Amino acid sequence: KKHTEMALTDKKIIITRALEQTSEAREIFRKNGAEVFDLPSLVIGPPDDWEPLDGALKEITTFDWIIFSSANGVRNVDDRMKEIGLSLSEISENIQIAAVGRKTASLLEDMDVKVSFVPPSFVADSLVEYFPQNQKGLKLFIPRVQTGGRSILSDSFKLKGAEVTEVAAYESSCPKDIPQKTIDALNSGQIDIIAFTSSKTVINTVSLFTKHFGENWLKLIKKIQLVSIGPQTTISCKNLIRKPDKEASPHDLEGLLQACLELNFN
């Protein structure tokens, strides 16, 4: 690993993430010599209506599994549970918990929640494929983002005969602005890499670029290398920008860093 130690020295990188999640990414890339420019492309907030989530939580003991596909879902579910005197860590003694992705799983473990299943590849499709139990007749609870998420989990499980309760646990929206320092770096052609961490960050970044740079934004990023965190993010890149130069594997921040280290800069 030593030879890649400071392989990103002097490289200027934009990492598109939720406002609340930029520091961890910044740290990882800085350690490898990169200069990180912020472009928060998601704002995480409450769902429009807490009612469906609260209703499901009142019935929580009737479920066989809770399936979390994001850390945001975990946080909001746990917060709402506490209001009715429950916690995820107690619940996990009797109800199995699945997490799509290492980051979601490690947050659950930090909260002393027993995680029964994490799929080998950190994507929803892998969770469906490797699910450890016959789904017929299972009662599954899936907290998720209010808009713009994929329904692959609930669709696939329903097809296999499970009873699925899927509710909005949080909403993610597009920020209004790009930090001035990042705008200046883009305008002066200094940015080497843009790393996308989800489909939604691609969609929101494109809308922020259109808003700040007009229809000409594609030309502005023509020479910038694009890196995607996983298959869904890659599809959004292809549809809205162009095929990314690299896709991370595993589909997490460490994988994203590795993908950036493997880029060719000529």
Image (spheres, rainbow, N blue to C red):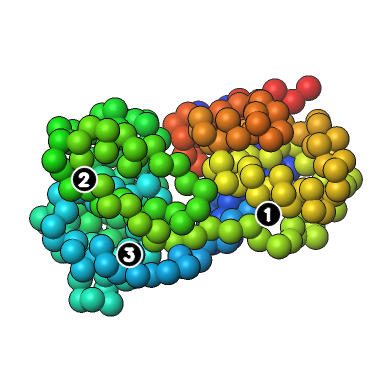
> Which residue lies at the image location 68% right of the left edge and 54% below the top edge?
38
Question: Of the numbered discs in the image, which one, if any, rests on residue 38?
Answer: 1
Mark pair 3, 2: CA separation: 16 Å
**Residue receiving disc 3:** 53
**Residue receiving disc 2:** 163
Q: Quadrant of the C terminus?
A: top right
Q: Measured from the top left, where is residue 200 in percent x and y? A: 57, 46
Inspect this view and state whether residue 258 appears. Answer: no
Quarter of the rendering containing residue 8: top right
Question: Of the numbered discs in the image, which one, if any, rests on residue 158?
Answer: none
Going by the image, does 163 lie left or right of 202? left
The residue nearer to you, when weighing 158 against 104, is 158
Three-letter amino acid code at the position of disc 3: Leu
Tally of numbered discs: 3
The residue nearer to you, when weighing 110 against 96, is 96
Q: Measured from the top left, where is residue 25 in percent x and y? A: 55, 49
Secondary structure found at label 2: strand
Going by the image, does 147 lie left or right of 152? right
